[in-house]
């Protein structure tokens, strides 16, 4: 079992990565209690009736209760505070459309015990819906189990640069010091040395790269060696294609594969939590095939915001994927889950938390301070 703890140091409340002892702590006692107290306070005050249903995302007991628990929740809320007829109708429509009132269980499929690609393939026909909107036609999701190349010359140029970085890392860093390979999308792409044309972005990226090197390069004073392999806009199936087509040379055998992927599956293509979860787990299976016994850290999809496209539903869907990833890690050897989401959120009196203005510079991207925070939490007391 690769659970998230609890294990704490007396003088430290940050996440600990200790893969040798199968201990990955990303649960923070004091901060988690504050977060829960805030959420409970908001629910107790009746701020957003839909917020009171969030436990469906994080609680198995809520899922087991089926429609009865949801119906009882509505009754309790109505007794404690009268809502307008309009709000009641909205809630009723949400529940009816979801099938909750009639006992239909549309909870996500459980992938926590999937052990091979064949089991994932059998689950394809059981997906409740492919799209984040609850249908099968409003998104551009493709088969989550099939590798997909990116499109356009620019994408292939970045892929070739990644291959070059992977080969250089494997050649220049001795096998015993190949600590980590970080695979992913936009966030990981900001860590590598690929040039960007935008001047403002270039200056920001230079700071992010300098800090990465000072943390993850022994030649630059860091305590470990790591290489970031990311491409902006990539989905999990793109990363799957990349590692099957040269981004994982034979000589590259790190102690840890750190996977940061999934946000683009949700925000860009509008894939449901089930499809996104399957896609990430498929990637894990491929890494395990190519590097049996390797340790894999699944970084929870980080918070995002925004009002356009699929953005409004993205964080809610991301949390559901994160639950799946955590359960999967708990049931598989050498797979670990790491999540700093609570530190990237802030509460400012609104119905729902927003991304931290101190650590983000947009609805979905960390600023240099955010990257520094992420680096330190990855590095902090790791054992490799």
Image (spheres, rainbow, N blue to C red):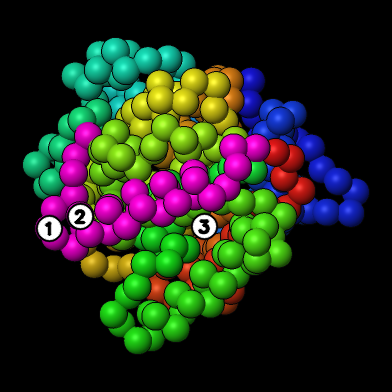
Q: Where residue 261 sits: x, y (%)?
A: 39, 47
Considering depth in this image, is 39 or 334 the residue closer to the camera? 334
Considering depth in this image, is 178 or 41 the residue closer to the camera? 178
Q: Which tag is nearer the camera, tag 3 or tag 1?
A: 1
Q: Which tag is nearer the camera, tag 3 or tag 2?
A: 2
Which image quarter is the C terminus in?
top right
- Residue 175 in magenta stretch: yes
Residue at screen point 65% across, 29% down: 3
Considering depth in this image, is 219 or 294 the residue closer to the camera? 219
Residue at screen point 67% across, 51% down: 224
Does residue 60 show up?
no
Name the residue that disc number 1 marks: 152
Name the residue that disc number 3 marks: 46
Q: Is residue 173 left or right of residue 352?
A: right
Does residue 229 show up?
yes
Considering depth in this image, is 345 or 5 the residue closer to the camera? 5
| Label 3 – label 2 distance at C-alpha | 50 Å
Circle 3/circle 2 CB separation < 8 Å = no
Where disc 1 sits, the SS reads loop
**Quarter of image, res 186:** bottom left
Residue at screen point 67% across, 34% down: 19
The residue segment tinted magenta is 147-176
| Label 3 – label 1 distance at C-alpha | 49 Å
| Residue 332 sits above or below residue 146 on the image | above
User: Principal SS element in the magenta part?
Assistant: helix
Which image quarter is the N terminus in?
top right
Where disc 3 sits, the SS reads loop
Q: Earlier in the sequence, mark 3 or mark 1?
A: 3
Q: Where residue 134 sits: x, y (%)?
A: 21, 40
Where disc 2 sits, the SS reads helix
| Label 2 – label 1 distance at C-alpha | 7 Å
């Amino acid at each position: 079992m690769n659970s998230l703890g609890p294990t704490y140091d007396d003088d430290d409340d940050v996440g600990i990565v200790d893969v040798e002892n199968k201990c990955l702590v990303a649960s923070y006692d004091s901060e988690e209690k504050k977060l829960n107290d805030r959420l409970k306070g908001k629910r107790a005050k009746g701020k957003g009736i839909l917020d009171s249903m969030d436990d469906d995302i994080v609680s198995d007991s809520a899922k087991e209760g089926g429609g009865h628990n949801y119906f009882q929740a509505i009754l309790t809320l109505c007794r404690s505070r009268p809502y307008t007829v309009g709000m009641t109708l909205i809630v009723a429509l949400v529940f009816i459309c979801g099938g909750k009132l009639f006992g239909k269980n549309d909870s996500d499929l459980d992938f926590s015990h999937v052990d091979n690609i064949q089991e994932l393939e059998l689950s394809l026909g059981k997906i409740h819906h492919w799209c984040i909107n609850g249908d099968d036609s409003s998104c551009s999701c493709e088969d989550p189990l099939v590798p997909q190349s990116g499109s356009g010359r620019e994408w292939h140029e970045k892929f070739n640069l990644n291959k070059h970085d992977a080969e250089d890392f494997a050649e220049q860093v001795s096998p015993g010091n190949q600590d980590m390979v970080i695979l992913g999308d936009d966030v990981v792409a900001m860590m590598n040395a690929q040039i960007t044309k935008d001047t403002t972005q270039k200056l920001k990226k230079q700071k992010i790269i300098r800090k990465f090197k000072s943390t993850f390069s022994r030649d630059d004073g860091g305590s470990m060696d790591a290489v970031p392999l990311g491409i902006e806009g990539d989905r999990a199936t793109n990363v799957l294609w990349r590692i099957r087509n040269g981004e994982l040379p034979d000589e590259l055998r790190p102690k840890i594969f750190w996977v940061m992927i999934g946000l683009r599956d949700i925000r860009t293509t509008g894939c449901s939590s089930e499809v996104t979860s399957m896609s990430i787990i498929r990637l894990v299976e491929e890494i395990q095939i190519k590097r049996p016994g390797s340790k894999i850290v699944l970084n929870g999809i980080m918070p995002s915001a925004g009002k356009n496209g699929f953005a409004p539903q993205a964080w809610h869907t991301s949390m559901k994927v994160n639950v799946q990833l955590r359960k999967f890690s708990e049931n598989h050897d050498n797979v670990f889950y790491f999540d700093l989401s609570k530190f990237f959120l802030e509460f400012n009196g609104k119905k729902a938390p927003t991304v931290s203005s101190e650590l983000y510079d947009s609805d979905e991207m960390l600023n240099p301070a955010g990257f520094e925070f992420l680096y330190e939490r990855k590095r902090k007391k790791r054992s490799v």
